[in-house]
Structures are given as structure tokens and as C-alpha cells.
Image: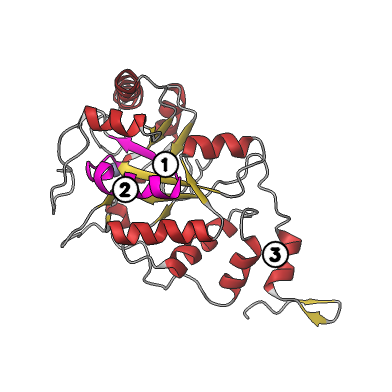
Amino acid sequence: MVNRAKKDGRPVDAGDLAAEALPGTLPPGGMPAIAMFHSVSPHDEDPYLVTVTPERFDRQMRWLRRRGLRGVSVGELMAASRHGAGRELIGLTFDDGYADFIEYALPVLARYGFGGTVFPIAGRLGGLNDWDALGPRKPLMSADQVRKAADAGIEIGSHGLRHISLPGLAEAVLAAEAAESRAILTEMTGRDVTGFCYPYGHIDASSVTAVQQAGYSYGCAIWRSASTGPHALPRVYVGEADGSLRLWAKGARHWLAWDYRGPGAARLSRITASGGRNRPDDPPIGIQQLT
Ligand SMILES: [Zn+2]
């Protein structure tokens, strides 16, 4: 064990520490746990590390369920969190709105009774992911497929109009990316669109303000930053290489950094204390290019 703090003259193990530091309730305003996926599909090449196979995805969902966690949309997670509930919930997000979500991810989510949030790009529906220079090209959901996902209970959020990095853009362009994409997806699905996802995870104060002013109740980023909060939520990247322990440990590092008080806190603490942590070369392989 790494942690050798003493208490009353005896070694304190990580479980004791967790019981002290993590009293077991996710407080209102606490940092919710959100996993970030992109494409779920069989694949041969994946230079941007945005694809997990359906088999891997199934194992990852099974792993969550076995630990008493339930995958939900970020909207549901935030609503529960506001009321001090949701300890057993983890947000599942799918950036870009790949068409493979319908064929491969949706059946797995349904099998486990999980939900999630898909972030399509409102101005690229039915198009391709041609912002990734190296390919491979992947089809994006059509309007019909977005509606199909919404009808299946999946939350639809916005990933902007064109998949462009927002920081540094003129105010009017920012407003269009945030507000017009929301209007398009709201009209398309007949449902309120309350979540935004920043392309590439890039944010600055102006882009966060634009998202707030467009009426979104939350925004998904990737990294922790000065803007971190309901409109710039950090997320945990999950890729094909993430076996169950690495997935768990990655969450532990992320969530404990936010004074995590949710499910399995004591176990998380034990795992991190015993070295089940990210390897130095772990996630940010090209993560700046992740979408
Ligand atoms: Zn993206």
C-alpha cells in the first residue's frame, strides 16, 4: 500500500481513509462521473483512437453493471446530482454521432438497461468525419438515425454545426455554432436539447459563455480547466485499450481528484493506493486530436 498514514498508532489502510474522506454521498454540485466514447464498431485501423469494438464495449458496460453502476445520459446524471442523488450513475457520452451507434452501441446499452447521450454535429448529418485527416472515413448519423436514437430514449445533445474548434471565433460565429445547432436538433427530434459538447474538447471563457447564452443547461469538455463547472464538465476518455481495471483506475484518478464520494469510493481508494493507476503512457495518446 502506498498510503501509510497512521491513526491511533496503527496503520490506516485506504478503506479507512475512504470512510473518513469520502462519506458516501455525492453532494449537490459535486463533479459527476462521465465517460467519453466516440465510435463503436469493428475496425482494422483507428489512428485517432476513437473506436472501440462492440465486444469491448459490451465488456465495459458489463463491468460497470457488475459494480452496481448504471450508465445514463448526462441530462439524467445532472438532474440526479442536483438533488444529491445519482451515486450509482455514470454518464455515457458518444461524440460526433457516428452512424455505428445505432447498429452497435444501442443494442448493448439496451441489453444492460443503460442510457447515454449522443452529440451529433447538426450541420454534418449524414456526412463523414472528414475533419480527421488520416481517416478512416466513418459515416455520421442521418436525421432519421438521430430521431431513431432519440426515440430509443437516448439523449441528443449538440456538438455544434461544423465540428470546428470554438476558442478564438467571433461572437456571432460562436452564437451560431451553439444556438443554431441546438435549434436544428430540437426541431429534428421534437425534444429539448440541453447539452452541448465542445469539439476537440477545446474551450475558453467566450465559448462557455456562448453555450450558456444559447440556453444549454450543461456542457461537456474533456480536461479540467479554469472553466470547469456545469458548462465545462471534464470527462474520462475510454478507448479500445481500456480493460476493466484500467477503466476503473482511470475513473479513480479522475474522480478522486474531484473529491469523489460516489459508488465504490472505498474500493477506488484501495485500487489507487495499491498502484492500479494509469501507466505513464496511458491515455493522452493524440487526445488533443480526439473529437
Ligand atoms: Zn467531436
Residue 138 shown left or right of residue 268 in the figure: left
**Which residue is more in the foreground, 152 or 129?**
152
Circle 3 crowding by C-alpha within 10 Å: few under 14, some 14–19, many from 20: many
Measured in 3D between alpha carbons, the distance from the residue under mark 3 to the one under mark 2, in whole angstroms, is 34 Å
View extreme (front): residue: 111
Q: In the image, is 269 to the left or to the right of 50?
A: right
Question: Can you give x and y, in whole percent of width and height, for residue 116 in the image?
Answer: 42, 41
Question: Of marks 1 and 2, which one's residue comes earlier in the chain?
Answer: 2
Amino acid under disc 2: Ala
Residue 101 in sight here? yes
| Label 1 to label 3: alpha-carbon separation | 29 Å
Q: Is mark 3 within 8 Å of ligand 1?
A: no
* Mark 1 in CB contact with mark 2 (< 8 angstroms): yes
Q: Single out the residue that lies furthest toward the right.
A: 8
In the displayed structure, 120 sits above or below 226; it is: above
Q: Which residue is mark 2?
A: 105
Start and end of the magenta stretch?
96-120
The spot of residue 212 in percent (x, y) is: 46, 26
Q: Residue 248: horizontal and vertical position, in percent?
A: 49, 64
Q: Residue 18 got which mark?
A: 3
Residue type beneath disc 3: Ala
Q: Find disc 1 in the rendering and name its residue.
A: 116
